[in-house]
């Protein structure tokens, strides 16, 4: 294993600072002398401990020294990582200095043998890589890159993920075209993986926030790159985007740049230190109680036969907690020995684990009631997801489940109160399942195998709010 001895150069720069030098010992016969490019005052170097000593520094000097210490640690980590990853006969002084110059904007953790090799190849053959445009690389990432699972790229991306990524691609195409139309100085503007920076990201964020208001003034942008590629629907007007929607798009863009960094295609990471919208914000989950669920389940809907069918589908979903995408594809073959078994579509490519949920009496009764009525062996008489959501809202209204709930407005990010029947959807069935079980056991490890959540999912953190009933009991303790 390589070791490093640090020392301070006797030569000084214009400010009287000296450069920190490395003597890297790879083995008995192989030693490298490297310049770090980091200069400090001589008084701030502890020669015995081979480290900076800035304990008594104050103000700007202390800030400067702290930054240099961070740079030194990263430089050392990169050198050791290169010595660890590559054979000794490759790791020469010139080779290390060349690689360090190529990956100066990457941290040590991002360096892999593959990324370093690509960086070198790209530097040696720049004309080959110049032919790949920003969107060519996005297409390569979309179609070929594996999804990261447990720190490794080994999971296949789902079709849903690809469709959502296509939304980002079309939006960036529109942004690029918008800049060309509105900025005379940038008529030939094109996104470039090496030049996208904080300012570009801020400009993209502003565009995404205001795109809905640009349709009438710049219709050509939307004619060429419509908001949807669904040919069965008339091209809808772009809707106002909330911060969560923009954060989701930016998270995909950031993942794209991380992939570029890993591959060594660029060392540019515009998201490092970026303070724009990158985190999605959600309120406390609202869901129906078991009492409300049972009131809906037992309500006489004989005058609304179509709603009665979808009511039973909704209650069944409340009992097994699956996503609507999985609910709609369940067949009789998914029922095995009193359990519903399926592999969640959302995570099928990254961790194909079978979810098994026992059927309680209410769920079993619903299956028995509708057995044989659905075509193609479907478990229940499902309709489309959108019609199902519309039916759920109507069911809540007819059944009198209309209490107010506090939600986050998806556009403004502000808390607002809405009747629960107006915001009810298929996902509320999933929240009903998770939320009501969580109130009883408060152990995500017991719930996740039945809900299909990933291990350590942050979704459960939102269910940790103490419910009002428990709050009242606590307050009574100090009467």
Image: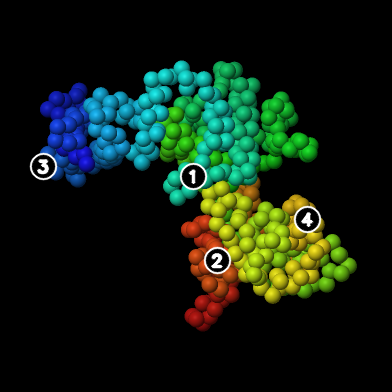
Indicate the secondary structure of the residue bearing disc 4: helix
Mark 3–mark 1 distance (CA, rounded to whole Å): 46 Å
Residue carrying label 2:
447
Q: Position of residue 233 (x, y in %)?
A: 78, 39
Q: Which mark is residue 154?
A: 1
Residue carrying label 4:
376
Mark before the other along the chain sequence, 2 or 4: 4
Residues 31 and 208: in front is 31
Residues 226 and 89: in front is 89
Are there few (<14), some (14-19), or many (20+) residues within 10 Å of tag 3?
few
Indicate which label's residue lies in the foreground, 4 or 3. 4
Mark 2–mark 4 distance (CA, rounded to whole Å): 31 Å
Mark 2–mark 1 distance (CA, rounded to whole Å): 26 Å
Left or right: 438, with 7 as reference point? right
Are there few (<14), some (14-19), or many (20+) residues within 10 Å of tag 1?
some
Mark before the other along the chain sequence, 2 or 3: 3
Residue carrying label 3:
48
Can I make out residue 363 in this image? Answer: yes
Q: Quadrant of the N terminus?
A: top left
């Amino acid at each position: 294993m390589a070791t490093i001895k640090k020392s301070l150069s006797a030569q000084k720069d214009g400010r009287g600072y000296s450069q920190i030098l490395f003597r890297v010992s790879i083995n008995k016969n192989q030693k490298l002398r490297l310049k770090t490019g980091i200069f400090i005052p001589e008084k701030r170097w502890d020669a015995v401990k081979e480290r900076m000593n800035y304990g008594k520094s104050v103000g700007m000097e202390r800030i400067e020294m702290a930054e240099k210490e961070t740079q030194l640690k990263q430089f050392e980590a990169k050198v050791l990582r290169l010595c660890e990853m590559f054979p000794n006969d490759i790791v020469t002084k010139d080779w290390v200095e060349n690689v360090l110059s190529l990956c100066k904007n990457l941290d040590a953790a991002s360096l892999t043998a593959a990324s370093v090799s690509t960086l070198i190849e790209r530097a040696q053959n720049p004309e080959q890589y110049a032919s790949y445009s920003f969107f060519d690389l996005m297409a390569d990432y979309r179609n070929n890159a594996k999804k990261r699972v447990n720190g490794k790229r080994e999971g296949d991306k789902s079709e849903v993920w690809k469709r959502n990524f296509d939304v980002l691609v079309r939006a960036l195409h529109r942004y690029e075209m918008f800049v060309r139309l509105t900025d005379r100085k940038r008529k030939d503007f094109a996104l470039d993986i090496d030049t996208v920076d904080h300012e570009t990201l801020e400009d993209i964020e502003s565009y995404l926030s205001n795109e809905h208001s640009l349709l009438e003034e710049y219709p050509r942008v939307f004619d060429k790159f419509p908001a949807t590629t669904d040919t069965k629907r008339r091209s809808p007007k772009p809707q106002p985007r909330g911060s969560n929607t923009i954060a989701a798009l930016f998270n995909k863009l950031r993942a794209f740049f991380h992939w570029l960094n890993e591959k060594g295609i660029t060392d540019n990471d515009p998201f490092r230190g970026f303070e724009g919208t990158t985190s999605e914000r959600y309120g406390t989950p609202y869901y129906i109680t078991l009492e409300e669920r049972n009131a809906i389940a037992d309500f006489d809907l004989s005058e609304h036969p179509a709603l009665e069918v979808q009511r039973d589908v909704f209650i069944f979903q409340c009992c097994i907690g699956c996503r609507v995408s999985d609910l709609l594809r369940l067949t009789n073959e998914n029922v095995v020995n009193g359990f519903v078994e399926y592999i969640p579509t959302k995570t099928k490519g990254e961790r194909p684990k079978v979810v098994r949920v026992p059927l309680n009496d209410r769920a079993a009764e619903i299956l028995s009631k509708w057995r044989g009525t659905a075509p193609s062996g479907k478990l229940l008489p499902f309709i489309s997801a959108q019609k199902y959501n519309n039916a759920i809202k109507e069911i809540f209204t007819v059944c009198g489940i209309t209490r107010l709930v506090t939600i986050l407005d998806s556009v403004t990010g502000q808390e607002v109160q809405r009747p629960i029947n107006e915001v009810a959807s298929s996902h509320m069935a999933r929240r009903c399942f998770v939320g009501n079980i969580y109130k009883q056991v408060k152990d995500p490890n017991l719930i996740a195998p039945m809900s299909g959540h990933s291990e350590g999912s942050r979704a459960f953190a939102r269910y940790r709010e103490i419910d009002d009933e428990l709050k009242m009991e606590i307050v009574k303790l100090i009467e």
